[in-house]
Amino acid sequence: MSAHVISGARLADGSTTDLAIVDGRFVEVADAPADAERIDADGLLALPGLVDLHTHLREPGREDAETVASGTRAAARGGYTAVFAMPNLTPDTDTAEAAQYVAELGRRDGTCEVVPIGAVTKGRAGTELAELGLMARQGVRVFSDDGACVHDSLLMRRALTYLKPFDGVVAQHAQDPRLAGPGACCHESEISGRLGLPGWPSVAESTVIARDVQLAEFTGGRYHACHISTAESVEVIRWAKARGIHVTAEVTPHHLLLDTPHVETYDTTFKVNPPLRTSEHIEALREALADGTIDVVGTDHPPHAVQDKDHPFDVALPGMLGLEQALAVVMEVMVGSGRMDWPTLVERMAVAPARIGRLAHQGRPLAVGEPANLVLVDPERRAMVDREQTASLSRNNPYHGRELPDPVELTVWAGRVTYRR
Ligand SMILES: NC(=O)N[C@@H](CC(=O)O)C(=O)O
Ligand SMILES: [Zn+2]
Ligand SMILES: [Zn+2]
């Protein structure tokens, strides 16, 4: 088994330390073997390996867009040591067998841990609950129809109730299908009117979340709002948390950085669900991430093949890559601007996602006896993002050509180096 000694790394709290890793765990430096690989981390920051509660790997089904191998390599390049894989696959992850299959693919091909998310309804069709209990018995704790909204309130009530004894969480893609139908693709605003694109109003998200948090209170179930994008949603979550409802919320890197005018060129890279919003919404999201109203940054990394993006804006598939630049974006928007410190970043990108997903061995402190999951970060380095420099099989990178931090030097998952610059 490999052994490493990482010397002179700074931790999120500002202290400096040497870290020794043997057999997948942190050990006392004195206990590292003499032939352990020495890694000089002078000037670098050591953080717990990042955990993504919201990743799209496209295997099984669309291995041309992403595989477990390529997606988890991208994750390792981004500093991640675990990703939760959304169930909108072919077939959908809506049975215990399908969840087991995704987990097995992860064990076979993964460069990080792959945790299957189960569908809430059969085929994510929104009409009949999936095998929630059987999936939960396989260890699945996060359930979502992502890509589609669980819009039937009775089904949402039943899912919350049913999952409660399993400690499961319903992760909702909040999109009222009447207010924002399948064609909706641009934040409803002056811009959608001018571009002639079907509008996706902010209330199509927040009204669903408002209903859901009341159902979470009524049932006592656990609820997570995926990729929230609006100031109204932030207000609803804030209200629900103040009432002690079991609710958590997530924001994507792109909703923290990119605004609606990016779609003015009709570049379909910037088509995403929910759509890019305006600066007032972005400001509300940043504030909520800093104050903890939003618990986690989830990438929503949705790889798409070129032929699925190379269409008129309203028919191209939605989604933009996230795993490789998520840390960079959060550093730029939140840390660089002084809105968030490093311990809070660790909480939002590693600790809280692991806790919400009930992944006990991830998001842990870098301390003796703990599993060795970490990322070494250069806080100063910057670079121009090049969509060709990627482990992903897809190229729908919204940061292409933009200068951002380029932080990840080395990623270690379970004691193994999974990425090295
Ligand atoms: N976010 C997106 O625009 N697309 C996601 C689905 C989703 O997260 O809703 C995808 O799987 O392509
Ligand atoms: Zn979604
Ligand atoms: Zn998603």
Image: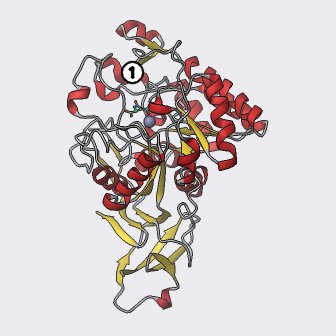
Q: Position of residue 9 (x, y in %)?
A: 46, 72
Q: Is residue 201 above or below residue 31?
A: above
Q: Secondary structure at mark 1?
A: helix
The quadrant holding residue 113 is: bottom left
How many numbered dots are placed on residues in this image? 1
Q: Position of residue 368 (x, y in %)?
A: 56, 78
Q: In what quadrant of the picture does the N terminus appear?
A: bottom left
In-front residue for pair 344/74 = 74
Residue occupied by mark 1: 261
Q: Residue at x 54, y 54 (%)?
A: 139
The quadrant holding residue 294 is: top right
Ligand 1, seen in the image, is in the quarter at top left
Q: Amino acid at mark 1?
A: Pro
- Residue 339 seen in render: no
Residue 378 in the figure: left or right of residue 223 = left
Q: Residue at x 43, y 52 (%)?
A: 100
The extreme right residue here reads 243
- Are there few (<14), some (14-19), or many (20+) residues within 10 Å of tag 1? some
Q: In what quadrant of the picture does the C terminus appear?
A: bottom left
In-front residue for pair 370/359 = 359
Q: Is residue 311 above or below residue 4?
A: above
Q: Is residue 167 above or below residue 76?
A: above
